[in-house]
Amino acid sequence: MAAGSPKESRQGPTKDFSMNVQIKPNDLAAFWMPFSANRQFKKAPRLFVEAKGVHYVTNDGRRVLDGTSGLWCVNAGHCRPKIIEAIKQQVETLDFAGAFQMGHTRAFEAANRLISIAPKGFEHVFFTNSGSESVETALKMAIAYHRAKGNGTKVRLIGRERGYHGVNFGGTSVGGIGGNRKMFGTLVGGVDHLRHTHDLSRNAFTRGEPEHGAELADDLERLVALHDASTIAAVIVEPVACSTGVLIPPKGYLKRLEAICRKHDILLIADEVITAFGRLGTAFGSDYFGISPDLITTAKAITNGTIPMGAVFVKSHIHDAFMNGPEWMIDFFHGYTYSGHPMACAAAIGTLDTFAEEGLLTRAAELAPYWGERVHALKGLPHVIDVRNIGLIGAVEFEPDPAQPGKRAYDRFVQAFEQGLLVRQTGDIIALSPPLIISKDEIDQLFDIFSKVLKNAS
Ligand code: PLP
């Protein structure tokens, strides 16, 4: 598709929201919002009532440009007809069928369709309901795989500092964001962390992959020396660590990490909950970086954010290791009531159709040069200590104010929202990741608003 979004994305709200949708302060108390400063939010809530294309509409009738694809998930833009139709038809035809010793055709169709766009060597899909569940599934699969191969001591899991792998116990444990861990005690045992690669002293204001830091992959050798490879099951990394503020791997880092994993028979899990489905201009982030992990975890854009779903992509050597017991026995003692839910599968198929028809899996590559120019034009604005970009992702890092960590970025996030732009704040960083259907005009609008906010903020 040429670099102009489908007409639909530029249409405004479908209903007339000139009348306010009233919500009283008391109506806000019952919902304890996740990952939110609840007390602050409820004093001045930001509430959406509708979305279309690259815009949200607030309850007071304002259009807000979605600079974050919802939560990194609405890659094809909001309320896309093919996806809506697929879900509607499915709910009227087969509302639920499980996947424990029974099945339904949609789940097999969705799995085959997903495999058709997966990196080489991935032949199986295990369905979950979220990124967090995909992570738990992959971690358990890695340990069980080694056990099935007779290597029962390989149980240790390695994550990375500043990594984010969801919020269940395994994912929190391999995750490396202090704030996400501190409330929850000792977490899962037998976990260690590689150093992160974010180094502004060497790589500030890099376009795309940073030049310096591939050698940080050798940190895995340190952990092998410390724990012994015979105890290590898997390393899990996000190709681009987005939730922690868009940490882009240095050139060659991921390939080097992969080689060390191979050397020691350690499985490599690529957590692609954000980087899968076109965000970098390739179907998967692993394609972008030229790596071939053993397991890939996904969620979010798999259904374009419409119905909760996750999927773990599995290579045959892993899958087949589970298929050696008696045929009548369960091969993997793991799964969810809603694994392969009919509505989620229909939504995934509708999403893949939309991606294919509009060339969205590669569209970020077309837009990336233009996008990168606009991201890097933010250099020099007050308190900006780094800007970085990859695919259709951008990030701005602000000089931290030690007295009020994160406040500078938070204030800019609020001001951007008031000016009609949704961005994502995490600590002292603001991340940008609009739907892949965004046009160049809309990219201009996004940066016009954002740079004005950055110029005017104190
Ligand atoms: N893994 C990664 C890399 C993510 O970015 C996220 C969410 O942002 C998750 C896991 C968790 O996904 P979910 O919120 O769907 O559980």
Image (spheres, rainbow, N blue to C red):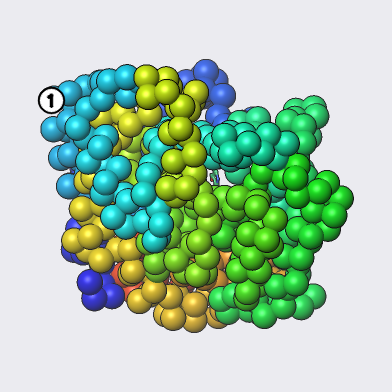
Q: Residue at x 42, y 48 (%)?
A: 316
Q: Is mark 1 within 8 Å of ligand 1?
A: no
Q: Is residue 166 placed above or below 445 in the rendered structure?
A: above
Which quadrant would residue 430 be assigned to in this image?
A: bottom right
Residue 33 in view: yes
- Give the residue displayed 26% in from the left and 25% down from the top: 103
The number of numbered discs placed on residues in the rendered structure image is: 1
Left or right of 405 in this view: 100: left
Horizontal side, residue 456 vs residue 49: left or right: right
Quadrant of the image occupied by residue 246:
bottom right
Q: Is residue 183 left or right of residue 33?
A: right
Picture coordinates of residue 373 (x, y %)? 49, 81
Residue 371: x %, y % from top left: 45, 75
The type of residue carrying mark 1 is Thr
Work out which quarter of the rendered image holds the C terminus and state it.
bottom right
Determine whether 307 is above or below 123 in the image. above
Residue drawn 65% across the image and 30% down it: 169
The image position of residue 207, as x and y in percent, is 58, 79
Q: Position of residue 217 (x, y in %)?
A: 72, 65
Residue at label 1? 93
Which secondary structure lies at badge 1?
helix
- Residue at 19% in and 32% down: 105
